[in-house]
């Protein structure tokens, strides 16, 4: 005996929800969510298939196979929850044999997207199936979920660095809270150095700080170099200070 439409909808929805807990129904549509993708199917169409077929279990298995195939075929090559903006020099991407997902930042610097693979960061490639607009938005959101503190290096000079060093240190410029700390400590016009991906230096806009920061750049032993320059930043305006 065939199920009536409303009972069929409830039954198949709960069976799908066992496999995909975040699935939901909007009017006549069932949206199956696997955490990174969605698949939408019309329940009336599924019910029609059920009426034309041999039974409920066959219709359910056909639907599950359809969903699985869709997710496999449209699987994205990156997890947007783990993408971050990494500041690198233009020379880095120019020397790279692979075309990377990037945007210009300022002067000789670029923003290159990278995915946190737990043990290492992997740069996002143009050849991958990536929605670049979504990826850059996700990267900015992800960097703003990180916390770090701007600490003064010495009492005699207003030069600061991040308290905790990691592969996203250079990207703290895009972190709203960190940028606010910069404003509070040195103002809207400040000196900036990014010797490596794990290092960032912020200084008050004073001439004597430029030479000190140049020496600090030279002493940075991280092999993932970014720039040997000291920049002067005022809002969205950048210039070389050295």
Image (cartoon, grey):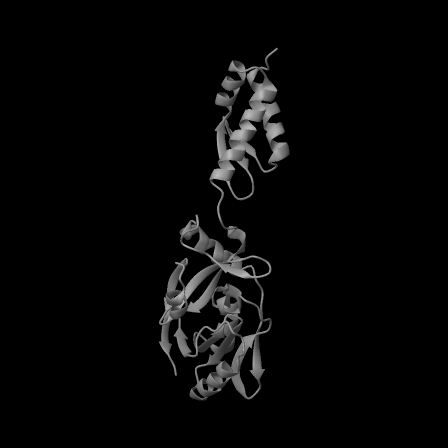
**Where in the figure is residue 124, as x and y percent of width and height?**
46, 56
Residue 19 visible: yes
Answer above or below: position of 20 versus 194. Answer: above
Name which residue lies at 57% across and 82% down. 153
Q: Quick one: quadrant of the C terminus?
A: bottom left
Q: Is 222 situated left or right of 14 in this image?
A: left
Name which residue lies at 51% across and 59% down. 122
Say which of 107 and 236 sits in front.
107
Say which of 50 and 213 sits in front.
50
**Where in the figure is residue 179, as x and y percent of width and height?**
49, 69
Answer above or below: position of 138 versus 150. Answer: above
Q: Is 174 situated left or right of 242 in this image?
A: right
Work out which residue is located at the far front of the displayed protein and give it. 97
Residue 31 visible: no
Name which residue lies at 47% across and 64% down. 86
Work out which residue is located at the far top of the displayed protein and give it. 1
Q: Quick one: quadrant of the N terminus?
A: top right
Name which residue lies at 56% across and 22% down. 59
Count of picture labels: 0
**Where in the figure is residue 36, as x and y percent of width and height?**
53, 44
Say which of 186 and 85 sits in front.
85
Answer above or below: position of 218 versus 235. Answer: below
**Where in the figure is residue 44, as x and y percent of width and height?**
49, 21
Say which of 52 and 6 sits in front.
52
């Amino acid at each position: 005996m065939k199920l009536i439409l409303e009972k069929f909808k409830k039954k198949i929805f709960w069976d799908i929800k066992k496999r995909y807990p975040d699935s939901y129904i909007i009017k006549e549509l069932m949206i199956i969510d696997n955490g990174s993708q969605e698949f939408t199917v019309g329940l009336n169409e599924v019910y029609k298939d059920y009426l034309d077929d041999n039974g409920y279990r066959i219709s359910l298995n056909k639907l599950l196979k359809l969903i699985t195939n869709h997710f496999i075929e449209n699987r994205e090559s990156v997890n947007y929850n783990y993408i971050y903006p990494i500041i690198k020099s233009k020379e880095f991407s120019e020397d790279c044999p692979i075309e990377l997902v990037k945007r210009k930042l300022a002067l000789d610097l670029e923003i290159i997207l990278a995915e946190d693979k737990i043990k290492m960061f992997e740069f996002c490639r143009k050849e991958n199936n990536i929605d670049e607009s979504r990826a850059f938005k996700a990267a900015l959101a992800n960097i703003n979920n990180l916390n770090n503190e701007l600490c003064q290096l010495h009492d005699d000079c207003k030069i600061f660095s991040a308290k905790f060093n990691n592969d996203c240190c250079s990207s703290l410029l895009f972190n709203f809270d960190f940028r606010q700390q910069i404003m509070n400590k040195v103002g809207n016009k400040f000196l900036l150095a990014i010797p490596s991906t794990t290092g960032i230096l912020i200084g008050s806009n004073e001439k004597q700080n430029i030479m000190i920061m140049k020496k600090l750049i030279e002493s940075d032993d991280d092999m993932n170099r970014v720039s040997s320059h000291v920049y002067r930043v005022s809002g969205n305006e950048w210039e070389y200070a050295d």
